[in-house]
Image: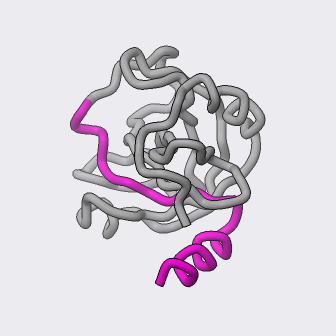
Amino acid sequence: MPCCFHLPDDATKMDSVHGLIGKQIWLEYFDQNTKFEQAFKSQLCTVKRKLACVDWGDDWCLISLSQPVIYDGAKSDHLLIRSRWDGCNIGDEKPTSVFIILVPDGTQIKDPFVPDKKLFVAWGMAARMPLDIQQMQRRSS
Protein backbone atom coordinates (compact mmCIF):
# COMPACT_ATOMS: atom_id res chain seq x y z
CA MET A 1 0.00 0.00 0.00
CA PRO A 2 1.42 3.43 -0.83
CA CYS A 3 2.43 5.77 1.93
CA CYS A 4 0.58 8.90 0.79
CA PHE A 5 -0.35 10.63 -2.43
CA HIS A 6 1.38 14.00 -2.40
CA LEU A 7 4.85 15.19 -3.24
CA PRO A 8 7.67 14.27 -0.84
CA ASP A 9 9.40 16.73 1.46
CA ASP A 10 12.88 17.29 0.02
CA ALA A 11 14.64 17.60 3.40
CA THR A 12 13.48 14.19 4.65
CA LYS A 13 14.51 12.39 1.47
CA MET A 14 18.03 13.65 0.81
CA ASP A 15 19.87 11.23 3.12
CA SER A 16 18.10 8.15 1.79
CA VAL A 17 19.08 8.98 -1.80
CA HIS A 18 22.80 9.21 -0.94
CA GLY A 19 22.73 5.66 0.45
CA LEU A 20 21.47 4.29 -2.87
CA ILE A 21 24.44 5.24 -5.04
CA GLY A 22 25.88 2.09 -6.62
CA LYS A 23 22.90 -0.05 -5.58
CA GLN A 24 20.45 -1.76 -7.90
CA ILE A 25 16.70 -1.19 -7.93
CA TRP A 26 13.90 -2.75 -9.94
CA LEU A 27 11.95 -0.33 -12.15
CA GLU A 28 8.61 -0.99 -13.84
CA TYR A 29 6.27 1.15 -15.91
CA PHE A 30 3.19 2.22 -13.90
CA ASP A 31 1.00 4.81 -15.64
CA GLN A 32 0.50 7.93 -17.78
CA ASN A 33 2.02 6.93 -21.15
CA THR A 34 1.20 3.67 -22.92
CA LYS A 35 3.63 4.52 -25.72
CA PHE A 36 6.47 4.49 -23.15
CA GLU A 37 5.05 1.28 -21.64
CA GLN A 38 5.50 -0.44 -25.01
CA ALA A 39 9.10 0.81 -25.33
CA PHE A 40 10.28 0.13 -21.76
CA LYS A 41 11.06 -3.31 -20.33
CA SER A 42 10.92 -3.76 -16.54
CA GLN A 43 14.50 -4.19 -15.36
CA LEU A 44 17.21 -3.87 -12.74
CA CYS A 45 18.82 -0.43 -12.83
CA THR A 46 21.89 0.95 -11.06
CA VAL A 47 21.71 4.22 -9.15
CA LYS A 48 24.61 6.32 -10.43
CA ARG A 49 24.22 9.61 -8.55
CA LYS A 50 21.93 12.00 -6.78
CA LEU A 51 20.92 15.18 -8.59
CA ALA A 52 18.92 18.29 -7.87
CA CYS A 53 16.39 19.82 -10.21
CA VAL A 54 16.47 23.62 -10.39
CA ASP A 55 12.78 23.89 -9.56
CA TRP A 56 11.62 20.51 -8.30
CA GLY A 57 13.60 18.94 -5.45
CA ASP A 58 17.12 17.76 -4.77
CA ASP A 59 16.45 14.04 -4.44
CA TRP A 60 16.45 12.81 -8.04
CA CYS A 61 18.34 9.60 -8.86
CA LEU A 62 20.21 9.22 -12.12
CA ILE A 63 19.94 5.54 -12.97
CA SER A 64 21.61 3.49 -15.68
CA LEU A 65 19.44 0.96 -17.44
CA SER A 66 20.52 -2.61 -18.06
CA GLN A 67 18.48 -2.47 -21.31
CA PRO A 68 18.32 0.93 -23.05
CA VAL A 69 14.93 2.28 -24.04
CA ILE A 70 14.21 3.61 -27.53
CA TYR A 71 11.44 6.17 -27.31
CA ASP A 72 10.35 8.51 -30.10
CA GLY A 73 13.35 7.36 -32.15
CA ALA A 74 15.92 8.30 -29.47
CA LYS A 75 17.89 5.84 -27.37
CA SER A 76 18.30 6.45 -23.62
CA ASP A 77 20.42 4.32 -21.35
CA HIS A 78 19.82 6.57 -18.32
CA LEU A 79 16.69 7.89 -16.59
CA LEU A 80 16.02 10.30 -13.77
CA ILE A 81 13.55 9.10 -11.14
CA ARG A 82 12.06 10.61 -7.98
CA SER A 83 9.48 9.26 -5.55
CA ARG A 84 5.98 10.64 -6.03
CA TRP A 85 4.77 9.64 -2.55
CA ASP A 86 5.39 11.57 0.65
CA GLY A 87 7.30 9.53 3.21
CA CYS A 88 8.26 6.84 0.68
CA ASN A 89 11.80 6.73 -0.63
CA ILE A 90 13.38 4.90 -3.52
CA GLY A 91 15.06 1.82 -2.08
CA ASP A 92 12.87 1.60 1.03
CA GLU A 93 11.41 -1.72 2.15
CA LYS A 94 8.15 -0.96 0.32
CA PRO A 95 7.98 -0.03 -3.38
CA THR A 96 7.22 3.57 -4.32
CA SER A 97 5.74 5.28 -7.34
CA VAL A 98 8.26 7.45 -9.20
CA PHE A 99 8.34 10.17 -11.81
CA ILE A 100 10.38 9.10 -14.88
CA ILE A 101 12.39 11.55 -17.00
CA LEU A 102 14.33 10.42 -20.07
CA VAL A 103 18.04 11.30 -20.13
CA PRO A 104 19.47 11.44 -23.65
CA ASP A 105 23.10 11.48 -22.41
CA GLY A 106 23.83 10.56 -18.80
CA THR A 107 27.37 11.94 -19.02
CA GLN A 108 26.18 15.44 -19.95
CA ILE A 109 23.60 16.07 -17.24
CA LYS A 110 24.31 19.01 -14.94
CA ASP A 111 23.66 19.29 -11.21
CA PRO A 112 21.29 20.96 -10.72
CA PHE A 113 19.56 20.02 -13.96
CA VAL A 114 16.94 22.01 -15.85
CA PRO A 115 14.07 19.67 -16.73
CA ASP A 116 12.91 19.44 -20.31
CA LYS A 117 9.14 19.00 -19.92
CA LYS A 118 8.88 16.85 -23.05
CA LEU A 119 11.23 14.28 -21.44
CA PHE A 120 8.81 13.63 -18.53
CA VAL A 121 7.49 10.42 -20.00
CA ALA A 122 5.68 8.36 -17.37
CA TRP A 123 5.22 7.18 -13.82
CA GLY A 124 6.93 4.02 -12.68
CA MET A 125 7.24 1.75 -9.66
CA ALA A 126 10.65 1.37 -8.02
CA ALA A 127 11.48 -1.42 -5.59
CA ARG A 128 14.37 -3.41 -4.23
CA MET A 129 13.22 -6.45 -6.21
CA PRO A 130 10.33 -7.33 -8.58
CA LEU A 131 8.70 -9.52 -5.93
CA ASP A 132 8.19 -6.44 -3.73
CA ILE A 133 5.98 -4.84 -6.40
CA GLN A 134 4.05 -8.07 -7.03
CA GLN A 135 3.31 -8.44 -3.30
CA MET A 136 2.13 -4.84 -3.07
CA GLN A 137 -0.19 -5.29 -6.07
CA ARG A 138 -1.72 -8.46 -4.55
CA ARG A 139 -2.43 -6.70 -1.25
CA SER A 140 -4.16 -3.77 -2.97
CA SER A 141 -6.33 -6.01 -5.23
Residue 125, placed above or below residue 60: below
Is 84 or 54 nearer to us in this picture? 84
- On whether residue 135 falls in the magenta region, the answer is yes
- On whether residue 9 falls in the magenta region, the answer is no
Residue 108, placed above or below residue 94: above
Identify the image quadrant of residue 21: top right
Q: How is the image coloured?
A: one colour
Q: Is residue 71 left or right of residue 59?
A: left
Q: Residue 110, percent across and down?
A: 48, 16
Q: Residue 64, percent across and down?
A: 58, 44
Q: Residue 138, percent across and down?
A: 55, 84
In this view of the protein, can residue 49 be seen by the observer?
yes
Residue displayed at 27% across by 58% down: 32
Is 119 or 14 nearer to us in this picture? 14
Is 43 or 50 nearer to us in this picture? 50
Is 66 or 44 nearer to us in this picture? 44
Identify the image quadrant of residue 27: bottom right
Picture quarter with the N terminus: bottom right
Residue 77, placed above or below residue 53: below
In this view of the protein, can residue 78 be seen by the observer?
no
Q: How many marks?
A: 0
Q: Is residue 45 left or right of residue 125?
A: right
Residue displayed at 66% across by 70% down: 132
Q: Which residues are magenta?
A: 117-141
Residue displayed at 38% across by 54% down: 123
Q: Residue 126, percent across and down?
A: 57, 56
Residue displayed at 56% across by 35% down: 62
